[in-house]
Image: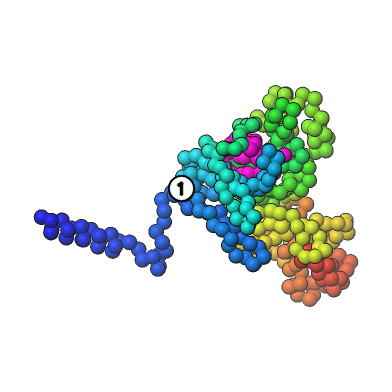
Amino acid sequence: VEGEEGEEEEEEEDEEEASMTPAEQFGAPKAPPGTWASCLRIVDPADATTKQVVEMTGNEGALCVCHVYFPAAKELFLAVGTAVGLTFAPRDCDGGYIHLYRYLDDGTVTLVHKTPLDGAPGALCAFKGRLLVGCGNALRLYDFGKKKLLRKVENRNFPNFITTIHASGERIYVGDVQESFHFVRYKREDGSMYVVADDVQPRHVTAALPLDYDTVAGGDKFGNIFVQRLAADISEEIEEDPTGGKNVGASGVLNGAPHKVEQVVQFHVGETVCALTKGTLQAGGLECIIYTTLMGTVGALMPFVSREDVDFCTHLEMHMRQDAPPLLGRDHMAFRSSYFPVKDVIDGDLCEQFTTLAADLQRRIAEDMDRTPSEILKKLEDLRAKVA
């Protein structure tokens, strides 16, 4: 009997091996949903070498990271938000943690403590010597503690799931996974946070970049880049609110915040926007908004500094739309307005195609613009040189 059982076990193992797809052709076996392996890697930017790797245990997946300075401890910490057993469809998890790391003299980190959460932390941000945490649909403010972070303030009036958090002064800019940006006011006197303005468009925010105190640039998962601004009079009214936000709930508009933001810029890139930042691509270059997409595109949005440049590019784009339509016949403006009408953005890629046109077509366009082809080419080269 023992011999027969041994033969049956060997046959079952052989069948399992035969049913497995070869790893060389199909890759390693995939883990089931909710199974995670992630790490924190410290890299030396001087020589691009790894100084330390901290493996996350307990089926934790690292979702967000930021630096935070706690005056109580008088040092800078590294905060990492992790979720346990996270699944996306439906979005669920078995809890989360905030890992707080201290920097050592050799550039590596050591764990100070872990703070348990009741949801997945979608975003972290340092704020006035404390830590802002987006946990599910709740915005929380934590302070430093010896054994764990101490929760001080919480606001649960967000629709779905917080994906981005930025702060400036007393104002907090919160991006929701489906409901665009929310402008939050923090009142230090009574330690409260309340939403003062939001958007009427349901945007699936994936990236955010505050441009000034009233203006925020964002990108969504459908490939749109947009800029929203709070009107000057509304911003002043929020700052000087004598009620301290006590009547915010009573004065809400469309079941939301009492004030709405204005759409300043709309542009459809065509690929999911992953990151936004401000910077220059060369020494002495013009500061611009740099974005990256899921397909690997790196692009830049350059601000115009003169009305002459705006008129030149607007007219050139208009002629290029008429005389150099896309190969597949789709209308260029319809593409750039796939989700929202394009507003106050000139398509530089389309203008650059002027150099590929036939000589007679270049002359005809240049005559309509009261210029010569060489002047147009020189102008395009000067605009390009301002960025890179």
> Where is 173 relative to 328, above or below?
above
Quadrant that contains the C terminus: bottom right
Element assignment for label 1: loop
Q: Main secondary structure of the magenta part?
A: strand
> Residue 283 colored magenta?
no
- Residue at the spot 75% in from the left edge and 57% down from the top edge: 279
Reading the image, the residue beneath label 1 is: 59
Seen in the picture, residue 250 relative to 374 is either above or below; the reply is: above
The number of numbered discs placed on residues in the rendered structure image is: 1
Q: Residue at x 79, y 76 (%)?
A: 359
Residue 284: % across, % down: 82, 63
Measured from the top left, where is residue 50 in percent x and y?
58, 62
User: Can you give x and y, in whole percent of width and height, for residue 382 in the image?
Assistant: 83, 67
Residue 148 place in picture, x, y as percent: 57, 37
Q: Is residue 55 left or right of residue 73?
A: left
| Left or right for 349, reference 296 | right
Give the residue at the far left of this rendering: 1
Q: Is residue 58 above or below residue 388?
A: above
Query: What span is colored magenta in the figure?
Result: 120-144
